[in-house]
Image: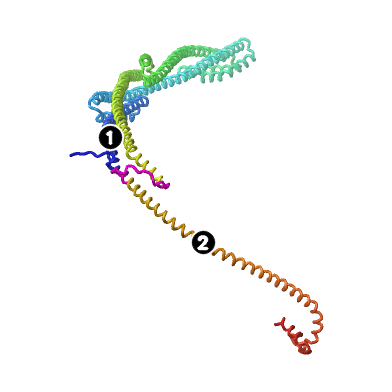
């Protein structure tokens, strides 16, 4: 038959063990609940962590794409692709339903990055093409400008030669005028000689003839055409013949005068022909001046066109660079307008300047057309790049929203598990508090109070109060054992108290007898002490008297010794030889009259 023991019948260790077991069981239950909640929180935190890693990868990929768009760094684009691939790989750590929706967004993001790379490669290739066409256009422009510069240089040389020829023609006209003036002077003087026979006129004519050959030589220097040279030879011959006739005018005036006039007429005719030749040359030179002026105007116009072409080419490069940095429809329209203007200028560029300019307009037109086609492809790739960039941003934003939603859901799940764990902890804490209160009450009621009562009894026993009542002696636990042990101590103390009373009575009797013996012995000793004290006083007085006598004796001996030392010295000196080292002894022995003095004298030496 099952029976239950009362609380006081069980040992305290058993009761404490049961209470501890109850608390351990409660903590175990709480730990299991918390473990379940913790596992849920761990799953939620892992999901949130992986979502955060995926979000970080997506954000990092977006940042690398932006950096690639700004710097065209292919390494940044490769890093972005690697981050997207890492994010796709990380989808295995999150729930399947969430991973599927996020995987599509990440795959579209990877496709947009691939399109971005393709568009960039196209743009780089077309940039190289545009650069090549631009360099060829610049080279063609340089060739044209060099040809124009060479043409202007040639025209400058022609203009200089033209000015020299004009100056020569003017000088030739002046020399011919001098020649005709000299011919008229000679003719007048010769005619005067023929009419009057004046010798001075002959002399003047001879002097004028002497000045004509140098004039002819100056004409030779200025007029070098073959026909002019031949005519100048005729002129020199006629001048020489006329001068010869003038020199011989005195010997045969009429004959030589007629010859001189005929030769002078020939000189005039030749001078007229030379004037006509100079007129023809002057007309040709005037036409040449018009040609030089027209060619100079054309080359200057060509130079202005070439300068405008070069400026527009530089503007084209600047606008293209601006479009590459910030693509826009306005900049694209400006580039097309510049290409149209360059096409018009290419059609009117000069094609007859320099050795290589025959193919220049066609080459420039081809380069302009190639540049236009490359820019169109670049524009198309730029639009594709912009679309891919927008798609990257949109897909990154979409993926970010999905990841944020997943992370929010994971945080919500973590909070739910946290709340459940907190609720379980609170309930377990309340139960633990109640159980602890019950244990505390039970301990106070069945353990602490009996122990306090037992301690009070033990203090009374220790104080000597052996009449204290000891309760709880019938308990079956440790407190009952301790109570019964205290009762044994009380009974032993009572027996010890009886024995101590008996011993005290016997001790008092022994003490009384001892006190009588002590009193008797004390009286005897007191009397003996008084006798001894009297004897001691007498002895002290005798000692004092002896000390006084000794001091008086010492003083007397010292006085006598002082008073007798001189006379004895005088008396004992002669007998020193007799007594040797003891003069007193010698004296005593010599006199033998007072033997007591000799003995007295011997005592100090001994």
Residue 472 is inside the magenta segment: yes
Measuring from the top left, give residue 211's x and y in whole percent: 58, 18
The residue closer to the viewer here, 129 or 512, is: 512
Cα–Cα span, label 2 and label 1: 81 Å
Q: Residue at x 70, y 71 (%)?
A: 547
| Residue 516, disc | 2
Q: Quadrant of residue 69?
A: top left
In this view, which residue lies farthest toward the left? 1
Q: Is residue 147 visible?
A: yes
Measuring from the top left, give residue 341's x and y in whole percent: 38, 14
Q: Residue at x 17, y 39 (%)?
A: 1
The residue closer to the viewer here, 287 or 292, is: 292
The residue closer to the viewer here, 75 or 454, is: 454
Residue 564 is inside the magenta segment: no
Q: Quadrant of residue 42?
A: top left
**Main secondary structure of the magenta stretch:** loop
Instruction: Identify the secondary structure beneath mark 2.
Output: helix
Measuring from the top left, give residue 179's x and y in whole percent: 55, 15
Pick whichever of labels 2 and 1 is earlier in the sequence.
1
Q: Quadrant of the C terminus?
A: bottom right
Q: Is residue 80 visible?
A: no
Q: Is residue 97 left or right of residue 293?
A: left
User: What residue would you read off at disc 1?
Assistant: 26
Instruction: Provide the residue span drawn in magenta.
Output: 461-481
Measuring from the top left, give residue 80's x and y in whole percent: 31, 28
């Amino acid at each position: 038959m099952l029976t239950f023991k009362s609380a006081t019948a069980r040992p305290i260790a058993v009761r404490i063990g049961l209470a501890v077991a109850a608390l351990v069981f409660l903590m175990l239950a709480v730990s299991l609940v918390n473990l379940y909640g913790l596992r849920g929180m761990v799953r939620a935190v892992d999901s949130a962590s992986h979502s955060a890693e995926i979000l970080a990868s997506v954000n990092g990929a977006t940042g690398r794409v932006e950096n690639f768009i700004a710097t065209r760094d292919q390494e940044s684009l490769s890093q972005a692709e690697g981050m997207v691939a890492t994010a796709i790989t990380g989808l295995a750590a999150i729930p399947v339903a969430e991973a599927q929706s996020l995987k599509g967004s990440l795959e579209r993001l990877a496709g947009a990055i691939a399109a971005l790379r393709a568009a960039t490669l196209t743009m780089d290739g077309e940039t190289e093409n545009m650069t090549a066409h631009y360099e060829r256009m610049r080279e063609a422009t340089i060739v044209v400008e060099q040809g124009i510069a060479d043409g202007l240089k040639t025209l400058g040389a022609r203009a200089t030669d033209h000015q020299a020829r004009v100056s020569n023609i003017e000088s030739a006209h002046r020399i011919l005028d001098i020649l005709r003036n000299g011919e008229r002077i000679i003719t007048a003087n010769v005619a005067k000689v023929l009419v009057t026979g004046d010798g001075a006129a002959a002399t003047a004519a001879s002097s004028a003839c002497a000045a004509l050959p140098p004039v002819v030589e100056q004409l030779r220097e200025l007029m070098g055409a073959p026909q002019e040279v031949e005519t100048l030879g005729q002129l020199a011959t006629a001048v020489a013949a006329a001068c010869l006739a003038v020199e011989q005018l005195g010997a045969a005036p009429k004959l030589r005068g007629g010859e001189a006039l005929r030769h002078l007429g020939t000189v005039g005719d030749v001078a007229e022909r030379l004037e006509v030749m100079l007129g023809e040359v002057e007309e040709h030179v005037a036409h040449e001046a018009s040609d030089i002026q027209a060619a100079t105007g054309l080359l200057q116009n060509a130079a202005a066109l070439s300068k405008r072409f070069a400026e527009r080419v530089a503007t084209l490069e600047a606008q293209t660079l601006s479009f590459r940095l910030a693509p826009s429809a306005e900049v694209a329209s400006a580039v097309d307008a510049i290409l149209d203007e360059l096409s018009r200028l290419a059609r009117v560029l000069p094609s007859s300047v320099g050795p290589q300019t025959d193919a220049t307009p066609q080459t420039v037109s081809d380069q302009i057309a190639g540049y236009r086609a490359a820019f169109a492809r670049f524009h198309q790739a730029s639009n594709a790049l912009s679309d891919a960039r927008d798609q990257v941003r949109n897909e990154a934003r979409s993926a970010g929203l999905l990841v944020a939603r997943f992370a929010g859901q994971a945080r919500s799940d973590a909070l739910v598990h946290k709340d459940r764990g907190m609720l379980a902890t609170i309930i377990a804490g309340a139960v633990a508090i109640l159980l602890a209160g019950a244990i505390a009450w039970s301990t106070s009621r069945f353990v602490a109070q009996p122990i306090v009562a037992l301690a009070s009894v033990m203090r009374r026993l220790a104080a000597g109060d052996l009449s204290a009542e000891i309760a709880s002696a019938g308990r079956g636990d440790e407190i009952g054992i301790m109570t019964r042990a205290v009762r044994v101590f009380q009974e032993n103390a009572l027996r010890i108290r009886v024995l101590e009373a008996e011993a005290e009575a016997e001790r008092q009797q022994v003490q009384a007898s001892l006190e009588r013996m002590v009193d008797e012995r004390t009286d005897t000793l007191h009397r003996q002490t008084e006798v001894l004290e009297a004897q001691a006083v007498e002895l002290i007085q005798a000692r004092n008297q002896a000390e006084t006598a000794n001091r008086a004796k010492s003083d007397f001996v010292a006085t006598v010794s002082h008073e007798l030392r001189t006379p004895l010295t005088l008396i004992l000196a002669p007998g020193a030889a007799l007594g040797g080292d003891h003069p007193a002894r010698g004296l005593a022995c010599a006199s033998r009259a007072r033997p007591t003095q000799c003995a007295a004298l011997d005592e100090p030496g001994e």
